[in-house]
Amino acid sequence: MHRFIQQLPKVELHLHIEGSLEPELMFELAQRNQVDIPFTSPQEVRDAYQFTNLQDFLDIYYQGANVLLHEQDFYDLTWAYLLRCKEDNVIHTEIFFDPQTHTARGVAFETVIEGISKALDQGKKELGISSQIIMCFLRHLSEEDAIKTLEQALPYKDKIIGVGLDSSEQGHPPEKFTEVFRQAHEAGFLAVAHAGEEGPAMNIRNAIDILGVHRVDHGVRCVEDKALVTELAETRMPLTVCPLSNLKLKVFEEMEEHNIVELLRQGLCVTINSDDPAYFGGYMTDNFNAVADAHPMSHEELAQFTLNAIEASFIADQEKQQMKNTVHKFLTIHG
Ligand code: HPA
Ligand code: ZN
């Protein structure tokens, strides 16, 4: 099973590039940029990654991002992630970045987007991995701040496919960002939002109905509203689920309790993603393995996660069809 999973073509739709910062690179960048970090070794960083909830993680995650200052840093970060994608047979990835985490520290929007997009261009050419970029608004900050960030993004619209919403869900519901999402749609951006990770099912409804999202990030608390689950299945509204993240942040206590396979079998467009792999202990293959170990599944069901991700991705229909053909061919040979 693990061999099949490793070789299975994969598509990632929920990955925070800042969350792919491995402790070794964090140390290297801290030295290169002469930034103080409160750790003496990469192992000490890893030992600190014990979280009891989302906020615990976010505090450490924003601290880690302090070592990212120059275009080269964002390039190195993104390139390291792409090399991991290659190992895991990820053929397409749509990555998030958090501009406000950087602009608040005096790093220019341009520095961030240029570093990331140069690495992604090279990834397409040298590794054959296609990609898109989504910028997320930090929901613990004001809507006014998000609107300013949207304005900063306009000159780079050709590089950014959509907007998202991340950070602390508790106390910062989707409807707080109604106006900025309205403006983002008007400017031609697609939209996604984290909802129903730590927050209630109502946040999923409101992300869909008020923010007009095309995908829901996480969304696993939909099961608390039976009518919503039926609606998600009927509309094929995608959920970008992150199994190892959910375990690390105690959304579920055990992988056996995770609802992703049940949702797949109910016909929802659920996908498997790594979220913040450097913090949560695994990239795409690790996430697939963790789910399959806890929930016995057929090869067809495993491949369905990739087919769902292709369906949910922000790429042209023709490319989607080509990717689907690749998966079906893989299944014929390895199924
Ligand atoms: N949830 C909310 N915000 C985040 C996450 C997450 O899982 N990862 C990075 N920012
Ligand atoms: Zn996330």
Image (cartoon, rainbow, N blue to C red):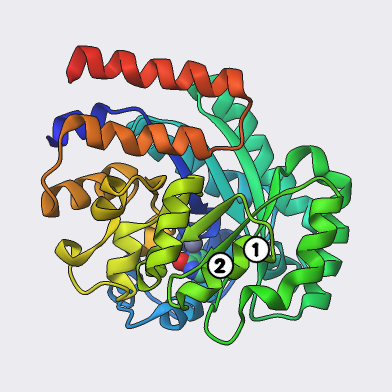
Q: Which residue is mark 2?
A: 205
Residue 96 in picture, x, y percent from top left: 59, 53
Q: Is residue 70 left or right of residue 179?
A: left
* Quarter assignment of residue 177: bottom right
Query: Mark 2 packing: few (<14 Cα in 10 Å), some, or many (20+)?
Result: many
Residue at the (51%, 27%) spot, across then down: 129
Q: Is residue 282 left or right of residue 256?
A: right
What secondary structure is marked by label 2?
helix
Labelled pair 2, 1 in contact (Cβ < 8 Å): yes
Q: Amino acid at mark 1?
A: Asp
* Quarter assignment of residue 169: bottom right
Q: Nearer the viewer, residue 92 or 173?
A: 173
- The image shows residue 60, relative to residue 17, as above or below, that is below
Residue 86 in picture, x, y percent from top left: 39, 31
Q: CA distance from mark 2 to mark 1?
A: 6 Å
What secondary structure is marked by label 1?
helix
Residue 52 in picture, x, y percent from top left: 32, 83
Q: Which residue is mark 1?
A: 209
Residue 165 in sight in this render = no
Residue at the (60%, 28%) spot, across then down: 122
- The image shows residue 15, relative to residue 31, as above or below, that is above
Q: Amino acid at mark 2?
A: Arg
Residue at the (12%, 50%) spot, across then down: 293
Q: Label for residue 111?
A: none
Q: Which quadrant of the rendered structure holds the C terminus?
A: top left
* Quarter assignment of residue 139: bottom right
